Amino acid sequence: MKDFDSIPALMADLGKRAKAASRDLAFANPERKHAALIAAADAVWANRAQIIEANRKDLEFGREKGLSPAMMDRLMLDEARVQGMVDGLRAVADQTDPVGEVLAEWDRPTGLKIQRVRTPLGVIGVIYESRPNVTADAGALCLKSGNAVILRGGSESFHSSTAIHACLVEGLKAADLPEDAIQLVPTRDRAAVQELLTMTDYVDVIVPRGGKGLVGLVQREARVPVFAHLEGIVHIYVDKAADPQKTLDVVLNAKTRRTGICGAAECLLIHQDIAETLGRDVITALLKAGVEVHAEGALAVEGTIPATAEDWGKEFLDSVIAAKPVADIDAAIAHIQHYGSNHTDCIMTEDDTAVARFFERLDSAILMHNASTQFADGGEFGMGAEIGIATGKMHARGPVGAAQLTSFKYLVRGNGTIRD
């Protein structure tokens, strides 16, 4: 990396090189991209000790910064999580290459033959906070979809991300693809983020992955288009026709498996007819699991904390959940429409009519029935990995995998065809 006298000069250089790399990647054949990702996976596993040692420095930095336990969990890498990155890289490698896929084709009476085909977006900027595994996920998905990427990891994951990025570059070299296809911003300076958000000459899309503060900043200040979700305010509605065992299993998993991820349940809505039976059983189970429950009405059993107005529409990202009884499914839907973030919401019921109503009347990016909201993840959707969960309504929505990182173009073929 060259020395630069300013952050704008550094970022402009990254942008120029990414733009040049994106032109080569746009027509790189699937075999070379596959080879690069497999070689990167091998490099990550071969260098796992170095990656975990780099992560140890980041954990120390995080403790000094006073990160919450949930944020420290996001930051931590062990051998199992490194294996998860390796598995993700291999899964993305083995997916069908989206570039060039024919989405539709038709003939016109004029004699024109028209195809709509997938094409890369170009250069993607990914800004993320503590999760170092995003370095591997984002790099893999952008490469698979033929995009160059500029990665800007959080200051707390700087050493881990640098070690993982070096493995991705090894993969690019092994497949004879441009090393500039996957670049990591080599500084913790926050000015680099501000610069990346306005690089309209070089960057085609920004993907922020992190908390409300980061995503809000990006959405406010970016001049480049953004794929983003602001918060994961995830609700589970327990209908009066819910199966008790399924409900206990799903709610506990949705809240406690990992509390710091965007798919973790944050609010529990329980039909009033079962609030004093199944509802209380669920609250008791959560309390026994160590969850702090902010409850009201019939759910305010011994051990809970009285819910306040601030608890509704709050992303706790911790072992905390808000709970309240609701009159019926329509009241649950109205609550979610008011307080939700269009991320992921779930209904527990054995009533197909209730499921249809919930699915029809809510417009979250992901709606679930009788399944843990912790499945709100691109890997679990069969995408190998994800670059984030998009909750907007333009272009990509829900888990953003390789296919969602493409646009399309029209190929129009004639035979000396002219227009009257």
Image (cartoon, grey):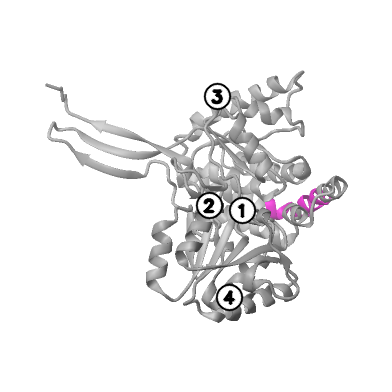
Badge 2 or badge 1: first in the primary sequence: 1
Structural distance between the alpha carbons of marks 4 and 1: 21 Å
Q: Which residue is mark 3?
A: 200
- Give coordinates of residue 369: x percent, y percent: 47, 67
Q: Earlier in the sequence, mark 3 or mark 1?
A: 3
Q: Which residues are magenta?
A: 44-56
Please tell me which residue is depicted at 44% across the width and 76% down the height of the picture: 350
Q: Earlier in the sequence, mark 4 or mark 1?
A: 4
At horizontal 44% and vertical 47% (from top left) the residue drawn is: 97
Q: Nearer the observer, disc 4 or disc 3?
A: 4
State yes or no: discs 3 and 2 in contact (Cβ < 8 Å). Answer: no
Task: Give how far across and how far down residue 55 sits, in percent.
Answer: 79, 50
Mark 2 in CB contact with mark 1 (< 8 angstroms): yes
In front of the other: 30 or 198: 198
**In the rendered structure, which amino acid carries the disc numbered 3?**
Thr
Q: CA distance from mark 3 to mark 2?
A: 35 Å
Label 2 is placed on what type of residue? His
Q: CA distance from mark 4 to mark 2?
A: 22 Å
Circle on res. 275: 4
Q: Neighbour class for label 4 at 10 Å: few (<14), some, many (≥20)?
A: many
